[in-house]
Structures are given as structure tokens and as C-alpha cells.
Image (spheres, helix red, strand yellow):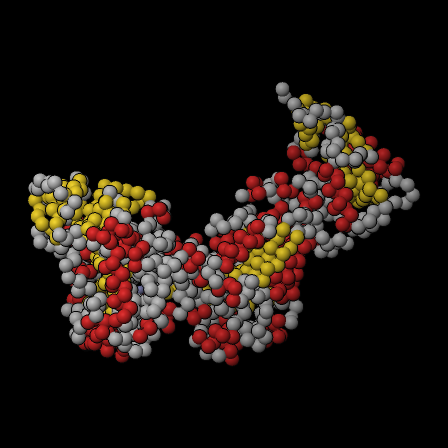
Amino acid sequence: MTGTLIRGASLLGETREDIRIRGGRIAATGRLTPELDERVIDADGLLALPGLVDLHTHLREPGGEASETVLTGTRAAAAGGYTAVFAMANTSPVADTAGVVEQVHALGAQHGYATVRPIGAVTVGLEGERLSEIGAMARSRAQVRVFSDDGKCVHDALLMRRALEYVATFDGVIAQHAQEPRLTEGAQMNEGALSGELGLAGWPAVAEESIVARDVLLAQHTGARLHVCHVSTAGSVDVIRWAKARGIAVTAEVTPHHLLLTEELARGYDARFKVNPPLRRDDDVRALREALADGTIDIVATDHAPHPAEAKECTWAEAAFGMVGLESALPVLQTTMIETGMLGWADLARVMSSAPAEIGRLDGYGDPLTEGAPAHVTLVDPAARRTWSTGDLRGRSRNTPYTGVELAGAIVATVHGGVATVLDGTLVDAEEVARRG
Amino acid sequence: MKHLLSTRDLDRETAVGILDIAEDMALTADREVRKLPTLRGRTVVNLFFEDSTRTRLSFESAAKRLSADVITFSAKGSSVSKGESLKDTAQTLQAMGADAIVVRHHGSGAAHQLAHAGWIDAHVLNAGDGTHEHPTQALLDAFTMRQRRYGADSRGRDLSGMRVVIVGDIVHSRVARSNVWLLTTLGAEVHLVAPRTLLPAGVETWPVTVHEHLEPALALRPDVVMMLRIQQERMHAAFFPSGREYAREWGLTAERFAALGPDTMVMHPGPMNRGLEISSAAADSSASTVLAQVTNGVFIRMAVLYLLVAGSQEASA
Amino acid sequence: MSARTVLHDADIARALRRIAHEILESRRGDGRLVLLGIPTRGTVLAERIQAVIDDIEPGVSSAGSLDITLYRDDLARTPTRAPQPTRIPAGGIDDAIVVLVDDVLYSGRTVRAALDALADHGRPRAVRLAVLVDRGHRELPIRADFVGKNLPSATSERVSVRLADVDGVEEVTIEP
Ligand SMILES: [Zn+2]
């Protein structure tokens, strides 16, 4: 088989067309007749979206292979309909040199499930003291454009200013994990009446909002691009809305879990719900959904953060922050944004594919599914519904917050650069993907 | 009752019932033989991840008075910081045949997790979890208040009409949390006094009256003034500027103590910082219930162990 | 089939009077009599018997209650129950003649538990047992010294003692 024909898919939920894929590109669209050397995918009732792009993934390799590897993480990504992921820098060693980012990039290319774009550390070892070799990473084969100390905040104002300015030289962006460190010492969950009752140290909204406010002002002052990771509070939304109205070059992301889950889940002390930034109040969830709908928040990013069982099967305070999210991202978005009428499928393609590709300067992703475009395609069954379980996960870790939750939609097929990575809802064999890719 | 994790879960009837059983347990203290055969053949494990000699001894004494076999496991220090240790330790103890696990842990929610994570099926008794709750301390405090107020006529009564003022580091205090829920369930009127830095987020949603200064609360002529322990390290984290200033503003000084009504009880969960939150004049007076609290702690813990462990698993599960 | 009444209120009163007399007759020398009822109905019966004794020979007897909940050997097989108060009369039980009083004597396990409980309270000169009804089927080597009525019964039958102070009616019934 040298080609693929997707028959009868609904493009972005609008027109029904066939899509012919040849040599990694879309060869034709319209009403097409199957040819002898083509694999035919029956997409009757399915939606075709440009392959999803995640700007915020923790692949854990090198150093954290007990939780995830580039292979297992990109398999989870493909299962979730993703064709490109940006891999966060907090590995061991930290991705703060050209050597580490090229290694991660090469592993992604070798396995073929998704394009892996490493994110470079802003500061050496994420220590928040000296800038890392941003230029070397930008010019490396990994073509790093996004820089982040994610997990830690670049809290030193002078260092943040310099980073914004310096990164702009390479058309890059600083993706800031906005967390004032002194206001969140020992913090365990959202600060509020519930944290007071449960006796868990609070993570006040102002710890996020004060950094976002400072950073948008620095972005204005420097004229550089700023990206705000995982916005979690209504107050941050207000600040970003204000900054955009002033023409400041700021973009922002929200995670699927902050669009669905609230702090109430901490009540049972189940550490699967421990995440940074923490789950917030109903009012915050509502504000985040509205911000994503009106464009104040530009994109959805998973903050997929795998952890081994022992990092979660302990007391809340001792447990690691983070939850996996690649496989469940699109179902959560369909449930929270599409079925509520807040976003259409074309908007979804923007916030989960074209906009993240644009922020990350990842060419060839998120393009409309038209003749000549690279063949990155995600097929979704919007009529599917299922009660989520750890059996739906394809990565190495099991720390999903959605066990027992009914979510809409399912990924039926994913095509990355013309190579099917998921067919009939099942991952294609690793050898086959690597050989064809 | 399967577990005792929090006083928030207790209704008035259950709480009064525990206090009444503690009265029965107290009667055994005056007998020729103090030991009861009630938990013969049962195993109670004291699992202490945090040092607390007095609480551990109180639980040991309670379990032994009920003839249970007692295993004490002190797991403080480095072994605790490993992620899996709580689960591993709990499963090990279960394998040793523990019927009940009395757990003291520095992490809020640890007892809740032991009870509900599905790791074990022993009864779990929370002996203090982080800054969350310490239910038996609140029960012994309520028992002590009721005893002082009603003496031999205590049975069946709650704390309606009593006014209790709790002073100090509320935000970090599991004793304060457990007392707020229990005392209000028992009908008492509860007042909290602390500088704003030591009040928890959302305290305005609690069923209490909050005061930032001590004098207005003491002017209400409370029946009970409960002074919480102040950890010295708090002043280094900017919760208040100095011990001297704290004592002056929120301490039960000799002058403040002298101005209290003649029947006002002075309580403290111990250990006390004399000269900081409480003056020696108050601590050593006849108004002080500090030693009665220690004695009553054993009776309350006997009552709770009896309720958790004595009955059949099927009936109480 | 419905319950059959085997003792009416007058029968109960007569039986308790007879027991009171027997207890007094069995008292040798100057022994102090302490009647300890096993809650709930045993306590009521102990008080009534003691009242009769006190009429006949004032000042030689006293009544109280002895709860056995914490001494039962079937704790692990039944739901947890709240203990009842134990009241030992002033003067204690040391060197006294203690009469345990219960409504029905059946397997003997309650009495065994009461003997254990009693031993933790002191050392009586002698311990006797008075019951309103002995229905047989002993599982332990225990017998009553004073019996209101022997009532041979099948284990399937149900013997119920109801007292006015507790139940509003005064009768002993047996039902299949
Ligand atoms: Zn982050």
C-alpha cells in the first residue's frame, strides 16, 4: 500500500469529503475513487481535524524513564490524536544544552509517532540564576523556539526581562510557569475555605496572577513575546485580557483538567488530583472556558505529567504534582467546550492545532486539510461516549484524574506525515510506524 | 463505627455516646483491677510517623487497659519520605493481623488515605494528621469540659450553653479544627482568637465567631479558654514578629488570667510554652485542666477503641 | 401461634417475695447483702428484691447494678453495644455476700461474664445467683441459687420478661 484514502470524513464538522494521502502530503480532496494501491479508511460519521499539536508535554526522557519515555509518550500522544508535541525541559539532565535537545528530538524522529519539538530551559539547570545557551539550542537540529523553566517560575524580574529580550533574537518565546515561589512555599492545593478545612497549605490565586501581571508588563516593555502556561484563575484571565487589549504580545494556554475539574476533588486526599497549578473553584473553571471561547486564552495544552504509582500512592503532601492528559484531551474538550456550544470544531482545530503550532513556530502543522498540505490528520468519532478508565491510557503511567468519568468523543485514527499511527482506535505497531515514518 | 478520622463526621448522638462510654471507662480507674478483658485477642497497632510520646503513651495505655495486644511502630525520619512507605507499612501491619491502626502522621489526610485507599481493611483511628484533625484530643477536651461542668451528672449531656474561646495558631492546629467541629456539634458557642496571619483561609465559613484581639473575647466571660501551643519557628516565617509581642497581644498573661471568672476553665493540649501563650499563674492554677486532660485522654481512647474494635466486622463495616 | 403468658404480675411479685425470703434465710451470720442486677431488667429486679428484704430486716442489704458488656465473650460476633452503668453500692463488695440478679437464666454465659466483672471490683465473701426464670439449656457449669420459676423450654422458643418500669407491662411469656 503506498497511499491512504479517507472516505467520507466531515472536514472540521462542515463539508463531507474524501482525502487522498500520498508521500506524506494530501494529494487531493473531494469525491474520490479508491485506487488499487490505497488503504481505505471508512470515515463515515467521523470528523477530520488537522493533527493536534501539544505545546506542553512532559516526556520525562532522559532521566525519568520510569514514568515515560519519548516512545511511550508519543504513543500516548498519537492515541490522543496528536501529531506533534513540545517536550518540556525538566528532564535529567535538564534540556539546557544543544546536546540534550537534539537527543530528544532525534528519539522522536526515530519512533515516528509524533514530531517531538524540545523546549529549552530558560536558565541553566532550571536554577533561575544564569541563562542557558538559548542560541545554541535555537540553532541546533532541534530548532528550539520555546523556552521554559516549567515546574519552576522564572521569578527573578531582571532575569525574566533579559530572557524575553534574548529569546526574541531567535524568534523564540518564553513559556512562563507563573508561580510566585515565596507565596507558594509548601503549597498543596488552591487556597480557600476547603484548604483551610482540609489542613492543606494553600496556593493562592495571587501567586499566579502577580507573576502574570508582572510578565505582561515586562513583555510590553521589551516588546518580546510571552506565553503563559496553564492559566488557572479567573484573575489571570482578567490580566491577560487587559494585556491583549493593550496590544501586548502575550499568548496563553489552559489545560483540559482546569476546564473540567475543581478543588472539591481534593476532599478525599486522593493524590491523583494533586496538580500544579492546582485545581481551582467553579468560578475559575467558568472564566477559563469563557476565555478560551472568546480567544483571551489562545490554546489548549495538556501539561501531560506522568508519574509512577509510588509517587501518587502516598500522602497528599508527599505526592508528586501532575496528571497525564494526552489521551483524554480531546474528549475533555468535546465534553466541556463543544457540547456546551462554547466552541465549534473549527475553533477546536485552532486551539488544539494551528494556534499552538504558530506559537511554537512549528511549520507544516495545523494547516487546513487541503491539497498539498502535509498529511497530519486526526479522525474523531464525536458520537462516541465512554466511561474513562486507566485501560484507556497508552503511556507508561496511570495517573489520570478521569477514572469513572464519562467523556464524549474518541480518536479513531491519527495520521502523522502520511503514516497512520492509530487505526480503528488502536495504536499501530511501533516497528511499522518507525519503518514507514 | 468503622473508623474515627475526623470530628466533622460525628453527629451529636454519636459524640455524646462516646463521651458516655468514656464515663464507663473512667469508672474502671477506681477499681481494684483496672484492666478490662474487652479486646482480648485483638491487635492494636500504634503507627507513629511523628514523635509524640504523650499521645502514643495514652493510646498504648488505653489499648492495654482493654487487654488488646499492642504493637508500636515508630516510623519517624528518613524512611517516611519515600513515596511508598505509608502504603507499604500499612500493608505490612495488616499482614501482622492488626485489627486497628492508630495513626499519627505529619501529612494532612494520612488517616483518611489509610482508611479509604483500599490498601487495608483494619479500623483506622486518626491520632493527628498534619494540620487537619486530632479527633480524640477534641473528644477528651469535650469530656473534660462536661465533667467540670456537670460532674457525676454528665451522662447523656452535651455542651449546650457553654462558651469556649480558642486562642492562638488556628491555621496550623489540628486540635483547633477538631474542637471547632465537635464543640459546635455538641451545642457549644465557639470563639476563635488569633492575628490574621494565624487564621485559616475561609474561617468566615466556619460555625464560629472570630476575634483578632483577645480582650473582647475574654470580656464575654467564657466558660472555657483554650490556649493553643505556639511553635517557635512560626515567628521566623513572619506570622508574628516576636514571642514577646505574641505573649503581650494573645498570651494568657497573669493579668488576663486574674480577670477571668472564678469558674472559667483554662485548657491547653500540651506541651505548654510557659511565658509565651500561657503564664505559669494560669497553667498552675486550679482553673487549669491540663492534668485532667491527660487522664481523660486514656478514657476517651478506650471508649473509641471499644467502639471501633469490639464489635463484629460485618456489623460495623 | 401467639405468646402464652406463664407469669402474671401477681405471680412475679410473689416469686420476688419468696426469693427475698430465701436470700435472707441463706444469709449466715452478720453478712452484708449486696444485690447486683445485670442491666437492664436484672437491675430492676434487684431493686425490688432489696426493697422486700429491707422491709423485713432493715439495713442489712443494698442494691446496685453490674454491667457485663465489656466482659462478654461474644463481642466479636455481635454489633457493638453501648455499655450500661455499673453502680456498686457504698461500702463496695469486699467481704459482702453478693447476689447477682438477672431476669432469665439460659446458657450461663451472661453469668460467667458477670463473675469476671465482679472479680475486677473486689473480693466478696460469697456470690449467689437469683433469677426470675430458669429456662434450662446451660452451656456452662452454672446454676441458680434462687429461682422464681423453672420453665422448661425448647431452644426454638422465645421467653420474654417484661417489667412495668421498663416495658409498661408486667408478665413473662413464652412463644414458639
Ligand atoms: Zn507548569
The reply, left or right, for residue A111 in relation to residue B256 is left
* Residue at figure coordinates x 79%, y 42% from the top left: C35
> Which quarter of the rendering shows the N terminus of chain A?
top left
Residue situated in front as seen by the camera: A244 or B80: B80
Provide residue A402's location: percent of width, then percent of height.
34, 50
In the image, is A435 to the left or to the right of B197? left
| In the displayed structure image, the side of residue C159 where residue A388 appears, left or right | left
Identify the residue shown where x is 68% and y is 54%.
B65
Q: Is residue B30 above or below residue A33?
A: below
Query: Which residue is rendered at x = 69% and y = 33% of the image?
Result: C163
Residue at 68% x, 39% y: name it: C40
Residue extending farthest right: C29
> Can see residue B27?
no
- Left/right placement of residue A235 relative to residue B310 reads left
If the image is split into quadrants, where does the C terminus of chain A sit?
bottom left
Residue B316 quadrant: top right
Query: Camera-side residue: A337 or A11?
Result: A11
Direction top: furthest residue:
C1
Q: Nearer the viewer, residue A334 or A29?
A: A29
The answer to whether residue A40 is seen in the rendering is yes
The x, y position of residue A139, in whole percent, is 19, 71
Q: Quadrant of ligand 1?
A: bottom left
Q: How many marks?
A: 0
Residue A393 location, x and y as percent?
A: 33, 50
Which is nearer the eye, B175 or A120? Answer: A120
Residue C23 occupies which quadrant of the picture?
A: top right
- In percent of width and height, residue B128 lies at 53, 60
